[in-house]
Amino acid sequence: MLDTALTLRPHLLESVDFISVNINYSCKDVNQRRQSTGESRGREVLVFSLKLSDCTSLTAENPYLPVYKLSAVCVAHNIIKAHAKAWHVYNDKFRSQQQGKVGISLNSDWAEPVSPTSPTDLEAAERYLQFMLGWFAHPILVNGDYPEILKTQMQQKNQQCPEMVAQLPTFTESEKKSIRGTADFLGISHYTSRLVNASASTSCAPEYNNIGGFASYVDPLWPSTSSPWISVVPWGIRRLLNFVKEEYKTGNLTLYITGNGMPTPYDIDVYNDTARMDYLNAYINEVLKAVKDDQVSIKAYIVRSLLDGFEGPQGYSQRFGLHYVDFSNGNRQRTPKGSAYSFTNIIKKNGFPKAKQTRTVNSSVKWPQVKKLPSLPPSDVPSKAKVVWEKFSGQTAFERDMYHNGKFPNDFLWGVSTSAYQIEGGWNADGKGPSVWDNFTHVPGNIANSDTGDVACDSYNQLDADLYMLRALGVTSYRFSLSWSRIFPYGTGTPNQKGVDYYNRLIDGLVASNIFPMVTLYHFDLPQALQDLGGWENDVVLDAFHTYAEYCFSTFGDRVKFWMTFNQPHTTVAYGYGLGVIPPGVKNDPGYAPYRVAHKILLVHARVYHTYDQNYRARQGGLISLSLNTEWVEPKDPKDPRDIAAADRYLQFTLGWFAHPIFKTGDYPDVMKWQVANKSDLQNLKSSRLPSFTEEEKAYIQGTADVFCINIYTSKIVRHKTPMLNPPTFVNDRDTGEEDNPSWPSTAVSAHKAVAWGLRRLLNWIKEEYGDVSIYITENGVATNSEPDFEDHSRYFYYKTYIDEALKAVRMDGVNLQGYTAWSLMDTFEWTSGYSVRFGLHHVDFKNPGRPRTPKRSAIYYAEVIRDGGFPLGPEDEFLYGEFQKDFSWSVASASYQIEGSWRADGKGLSIWDKFSHSVSRVGNDDNGDIACDSYNKMEQDVALLKDLKVTHYRFSISWPRVLPDGTLNFVNEAGLNYYIRLIDALLAANITPQPSPETQPGIVSFLGLQISSSDAETALYVEFALLIIAALGVISFLCLYRKLAKKLKQTTF
């Protein structure tokens, strides 16, 4: 199927060559591009028309292929005949003397079935390829006629509809004979891939997908580029080359990669274009696999393109070049990009001959770790961890989202997480006392839909079901919390044996299943009896927590080796004592209470840590920490020091509030102390609202965690903001404003946008801020709404991308990440949201008293990740180290209108692109190719760039109106002709083989509207499109000019 540059891919369609046509036209993409760019301009696009007499001419106003009514089948038919006639002219008149080759360059995506095991999807993918590639390749390379799939599909569509939708023209038997075998080689231009399945549409609209009976998609995991139609799918080129090899077994047909590359934005990473370097490395390596492993006969690889150029309707907003061109500079300075150096290196080595190097990952810290962490100096303001923003915030979306394959260390812990109140139920069973959440949920209006955790998932009565799910997942750890009021109904006193028995059975079941218990002592559910005494602000409660913790160590510590004192203490103080939206619901003291309670929690945490360290660690061999939380925050303007400082402040006020005392100095971050003290002073207070520690307390707190446990769900954008001074609040103390990027995917929890790359950056920030501490992700997950979500694709995608970002942190950044824990094992009671959202890997039917559990698609996927240890490459995806054959050709490409400029210089005629780019609102930013890269005046510089690249060939196009201003031989413009002769001479002198082709896009304006009658079809071809009439005439008339150039050429590429 044709794929046209004039509508979609102007950087691809280069030429009606000396003897043949470069075919890059797709009706499918016309519609897609017009929809994506808003360029329909109110015109109806009819991709197919019923009969050849419907073909009409293109006006000079628009070089898009189709306008009004376009018969794609008619155009394709005539292109094939034009190509065949040109091939025969060369074969009969020039081959014996010039010993050259004539082929055709076709453009094609790869079509991957959405479901490779589905016969209908396989057939749809086959149709996609036949409609794009086979439409031209099959007549030329197989039997002189269209593929049967194409003919059958159109016939079926016509039978399904009340009137004819599409009809292929027919070739006569003599035409078939003339067309068959008219290619000495096949050029393939390939840029991207699509997922394809069978379309369920019954529409009779004459449109590409409807007639083809398929629908195409992009996998959201595929890295994007600055062009909406190009996603990065390196393995697609290998599969396409194998398809061509198997489909067109016509003797020893040679393949050339005649175009491959990607665009980057105009003003991002213009020199250090790592995205393009990665693209070229990956795609060229897939070509190498096709040559070495699959025995595909490929002779050349051509990068698109030598220079940044004029990119059709996109103007200069996209850059395809290996060399940066400064279009704001009259000299059009050319500067090699990183990709130019990278490509040159590949050419020098003729591939990838070096032995594979394996990155060494620091996995020396074994679980559990018992060495006390050293003290660290206080954080700077802003902290030195700001290097994370300097390193990552400038990444392009391509670099940021590029998928990384690999495995985690063998001793990596894979787990899932829950908490007691959210799953256990049995709120008053077997002597359990009430918690603050029992009381809070029983107050009408506190919880969505008046839901409660009275039954929840009924895990108190379904222990075997929970253990079964854990074993099925294959996890190596299970993080759960103990219900304080189930063990001590009133917080202190005599333990409740039935509650203790429940946890003993759970822990024994985990150990028997080779699953490490990771136990949280406090997960928001304070016994109500202790809250009645004043909660965490009362030292009696702190003593009770210490007693409860020590009882748990002595009772369960022989089997539990991983303890967490608190889950998300920031949530407790911020939402319980500041905003007052969770128990205990304190709302009237947001400037003091959060700081007071956090102070108490830090002290009692340290006390519990020292008790374990001194009394239990030696004989039990475990470790102890606490689980902290934050969002990742990105500066609104990464170049603005105030926004960077604001982002750092946000992290210090959330994560650093607890982490800085424990992991660094025993005291709060300096920026936090300064901010609160300064605000307090401005509020005319006698002292800071932030309490202070004594020197003894600092020493007591510092180092009271063996590992760093972090919960993360989302990211935010932060800027500097000066809020209201009064009334005092902990939120306003940090002087930040937060927002979301509207492009980030939303979830069922409005505050939780899915921003996977934030995880990698947070892990790097922790490493920079707190040293090479062992890190465990103890919660990470995503919510969907309350509807059953067995096929939870959004959760599947969330885990795939977030876990891959964790893998990048380990493998690429050297972060000492030791474990990952998904939230959550199953759907649970989600605090104030009740059961209105679902986080689980397993669906729980809360309407069924039996609370049945059903694995979702994400559970199956997560089990696969655990089993594989990450995302290892399959044998066919691993990077191949090796070299291409010695006679392999390396080339770059350009097109005359995109680089030459000098649009009216030295007698050049007008092209349709000259007219088009000078029309209103046709090209972005009102760009045009009048000057472009000024290559007409800088030919020597371009040749010097080619010599530096070490290419063996250069594929360029010849501007038809520069040589024949009116498109005929009535006048040959000697100045234009001499330009190309000088270029070819310079290339040959540099030992670079020219690969020229006359350009199709800049057809001759004076020819527009010329009609050829059907009686002339045998020689000039019957076409409705004036541009293709010119091309057809040019195939004949340009041969005369060809004689002047052909002596300098040994091979002509099309």
Image: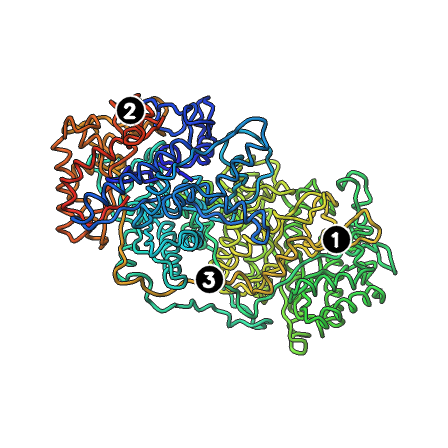
At 79% from the left edge and 63% from the top edge, which residue is drawn? 463
Q: Nearer the viewer, residue 895 or 141?
A: 141
Marks 2/3: CA–CA distance: 48 Å
Residue type for callout 2:
Lys
Q: Which residue is mark 1?
A: 422
Marks 2/1: CA–CA distance: 68 Å
The quarter holding residue 226 reads top left
Looking at this view, name the residue that lies furthest to the front. 173
Q: Nearer the viewer, residue 402 or 585?
A: 402
978 lies above or below 572: above
Q: Nearer the viewer, residue 96 or 934?
A: 96
CB-based contact (under 8 Å), mark 2 and mark 3: no
Secondary element at tag 3: loop
Residue type for callout 3:
Glu
Q: Which residue is mark 2?
A: 915
Looking at marks 2 and 1 on the same chain, the residue that comes earlier in the sequence is marked by 1
Residue 426 appears left or right of 250: right
289 lies above or below 1016: below
Secondary element at tag 1: helix
At 24% from the left edge and 37% from the top edge, which residue is drawn? 998
At 15% from the left edge and 26% from the top edge, which residue is drawn? 970
597 lies above or below 81: below
Location of residue 648 in the rendering, given as x and y in whole percent from the top left corner: 49, 49
